[in-house]
């Protein structure tokens, strides 16, 4: 019997290996952009034709390659980024496996031009199917241009598997955004079929996010920033009202590398809990930096999934950092004037680790909680809960007015409510003896020790009613005021079906209605807040709103009913209120579980802090 095992020829071995790294044009985009970043470029241009199927080209002004390096770079396992196994655990660059260029060259036609700084000539190399077709010297500027043409021209089976142009282009844009977002101090552009799609000047992270994700995020980003010895986190989350119904603008970067992590996503979603509607997705772009030794980035060929040495710490840290920022935003949305984009130029978000910041962070208790490396496990230990709570303790003088009710929470799970109780607690201290002031029949000014609040009467009342209704359905029915002269109402056939469905819940919510045959109902009683004589309109309006919500499939029937009723019954902007009405509105608001937003995510109040006002006036 002859021996049957043989070594695969290089180009076939490369093609097989390429399958892991280069699956579609977007994969090449990612690898080429990352190489340009690793080369220290300050300007990176991406050009694609035919959704990358015909051409993916990346042009950079980075350090370039010598003639030998240029040739070497296409060999499998050719890399300048690691030289021994220890390096693998210290990896700071984007690439390290030395597979990308070899893979690209195995499945496409490649043209490389590169010149190192200080050398007189550059190198031009043409490769087809892993074979060098041409190599010559050329004149060019410092930097590198790599063009990948006709992807999978030699692997028709894979070419047939490419998706439609819009779908491949979308993937290219996704990859482009992920790299461009993590390097706001690099200029990036993207040109598709001769049209410039992105032109991203260098700037702050915040500006880059707005450039990439759209102007609707201007002034609607909340900064996240926490430091510790174990890890740092910085970046932005969208204010709750920017949450979208589709998952999308959500980005995690670990050591500046985009990663996917359902686990960390869960941590962020938990921090937003109850501030946004269920099934809506908040924007976030969060950068986590930690010692590469605490990570394994090698678990996935395209390096998008990583393993943390200690996932639980990272989870807890991310969640509390986001909560902390959201809590601060709720206390003081006005801080935003400091985040104005013109002032943002000065913002050090792009260089978050200055010594000054480090030392100010070092004095925070959050920092200390995580300072002892690997000892942060104690946050899981109930007896050490105090450290967990330290997350919410003041990090600077200005915030020292915040007090947390330490007695209330007896286990770590309860900490989910700390952020909420934290600001509710604070605002409950509205000064009882200072009169409230209504402005434009819409806003109530209320003084507290830290400054004053501007409360939107309609939004606030919607929140109050909504929570009251939840309790009602939970077994504390709202008192029904029996009508002295029961009205009858006639409805269209489809509304009759609808109302019949809602009758049992409505009873709990204070509406006593009885079917009376022939599409007619008798209104026997309504909640005491509904003025006598207005019962009919109230119910009609509620039904109208309910039907409006009906297009929104994400809400349950009950949820839609609650929201419709809260919306319908809330006092409206433009209504004059007495001192007593304002007082009870404000009091009711701050005993709510989520006093800061309406059920639909609009803010209910804005806080102005005296010390910030003083600062604005140079005091
Ligand atoms: P890796 O990035 O993992 O090292 P690649 O196959 O992507 O592997 O690249 C191989 C090598 O080619 C890199 O290590 C680098 O030295 C060089 N290289 C690739 N692209 C560039 C570039 N745009 N500018 C300078 N050097 C580059
Ligand atoms: Mg690379």
Image (cartoon, rainbow, N blue to C red):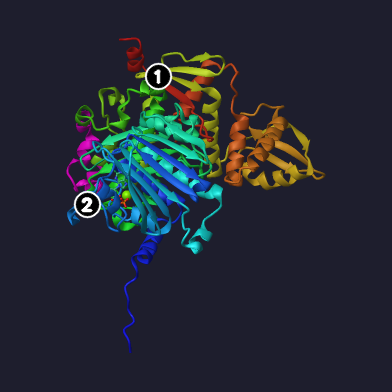
For the magenta stretch, what is the residue range? 360-386
Q: Which mark is residue 82?
A: 2
* Residue 409 falls left or right of residue 550: left
* Residue 474 falls left or right of residue 365: right
Closer to the camera in the image, 428 or 56:
56
State whether the magenta stretch is mostly helix, strand or loop.
Answer: helix
Q: Is residue 406 above or below residue 263?
A: above
Please state the horizontal and vertical placement of residue 196, each as a whole percent of the image: 50, 35
* Residue 374 falls left or right of residue 340: left
Q: Is residue 417 above or below residue 163?
A: above
State how far apart marks 1 and 2 are (Cα).
53 Å
Please state the horizontal and vertical placement of residue 289, each as a whole percent of the image: 27, 42
Q: Is residue 214 above or below residue 304?
A: above
Specify whether tag 2 is near ligand 1 (CB below 8 Å): yes
Residue under the point 70% across and 45% down: 498
Q: Is residue 545 visible?
A: yes
């Amino acid at each position: 019997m002859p021996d049957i095992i043989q070594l695969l020829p290089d180009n076939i071995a490369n093609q097989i290996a390429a399958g892991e790294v280069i699956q579609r044009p977007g994969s090449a985009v990612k690898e080429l952009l990352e190489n340009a970043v690793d080369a220290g470029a300050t300007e990176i241009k991406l050009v694609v034709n035919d959704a990358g199927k015909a051409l993916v080209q990346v042009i950079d002004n980075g350090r370039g390659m010598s003639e030998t390096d240029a040739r070497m770079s296409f060999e499998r396992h050719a890399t300048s980024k690691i030289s021994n196994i220890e390096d693998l655990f210290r990896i700071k660059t984007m690439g390290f496996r030395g597979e990308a260029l070899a893979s690209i060259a195995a499945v496409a036609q490649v043209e490389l031009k590169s010149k190192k700084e200080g050398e007189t000539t550059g190198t031009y190399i043409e490769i087809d199917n892993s074979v060098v077709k041409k190599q010559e010297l050329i004149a060019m500027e410092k930097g590198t241009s790599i063009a990948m043409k006709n992807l999978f021209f030699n692997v028709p089976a894979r070419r047939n598997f490419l998706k439609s142009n819009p779908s491949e282009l979308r993937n290219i844009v996704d990859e482009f955004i992920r790299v461009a977002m993590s390097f706001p101090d690099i200029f990036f552009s993207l040109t598709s079929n001769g049209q410039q799609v992105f032109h991203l000047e260098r700037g702050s992270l915040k500006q880059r996010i707005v450039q990439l994700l759209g102007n609707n995020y201007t002034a609607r980003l909340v900064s996240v920033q926490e430091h510790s010895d174990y890890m740092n986190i910085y970046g932005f989350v969208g204010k709750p009202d920017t949450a979208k119904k589709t998952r999308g603008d959500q980005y995690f970067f670990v050591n500046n590398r985009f990663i996917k992590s359902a686990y960390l996503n869960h941590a962020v979603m938990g921090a937003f809990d109850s501030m946004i509607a269920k099934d809506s997705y908040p924007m976030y772009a969060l950068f986590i930096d930690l010692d590469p030794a605490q990570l394994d980035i090698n678990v996935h060929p395209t390096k998008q999934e990583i393993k943390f040495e200690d996932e639980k710490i990272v989870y807890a840290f991310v969640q509390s950092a986001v909560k902390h920022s959201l809590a601060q935003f709720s206390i003081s949305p006005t801080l935003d004037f400091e985040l104005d984009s013109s002032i943002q130029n000065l913002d050090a978000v792009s260089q978050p680790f200055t010594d000054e910041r480090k030392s100010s962070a070092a004095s925070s208790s959050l920092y200390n909680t995580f300072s002892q490396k690997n000892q942060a496990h104690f946050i899981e230990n109930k007896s050490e809960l105090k450290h967990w709570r330290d997350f919410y303790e003041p990090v600077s003088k200005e915030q020292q007015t915040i007090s947390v009710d330490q007695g209330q929470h007896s286990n770590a799970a309860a900490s989910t409510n700390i952020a909420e109780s934290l600001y509710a607690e604070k605002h409950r201290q509205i000064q009882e003896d200072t009169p409230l002031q209504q402005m434009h029949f819409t806003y109530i000014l209320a003084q507290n020790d830290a400054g004053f609040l501007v409360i939107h009467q309609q939004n606030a009342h919607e929140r109050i009613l909504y929570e009251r209704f939840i309790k009602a359905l939970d077994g504390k029915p709202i008192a029904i005021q029996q009508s002295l002269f029961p009205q009858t109402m006639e409805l269209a056939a489809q509304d009759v079906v609808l109302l019949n469905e809602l009758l049992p819940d409505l009873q709990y919510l204070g509406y006593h209605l009885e079917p009376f045959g022939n599409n007619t109902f008798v209104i026997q009683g309504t909640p005491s807040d509904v003025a006598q004589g207005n019962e009919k309109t109230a119910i009609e309006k509620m039904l109208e709103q309910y039907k409006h919500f009906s297009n929104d499939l994400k809400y349950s029937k009950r949820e839609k009913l609650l929201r419709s009723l809260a919306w319908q019954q809330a006092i409206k902007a433009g209504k004059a209120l007495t001192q007593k009405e304002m007082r009870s509105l404000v009091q009711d608001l701050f005993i709510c579980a989520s006093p800061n937003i309406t059920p639909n995510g609009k803010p209910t109040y804005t806080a102005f802090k005296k010390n910030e006002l003083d600062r604005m006036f140079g005091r």
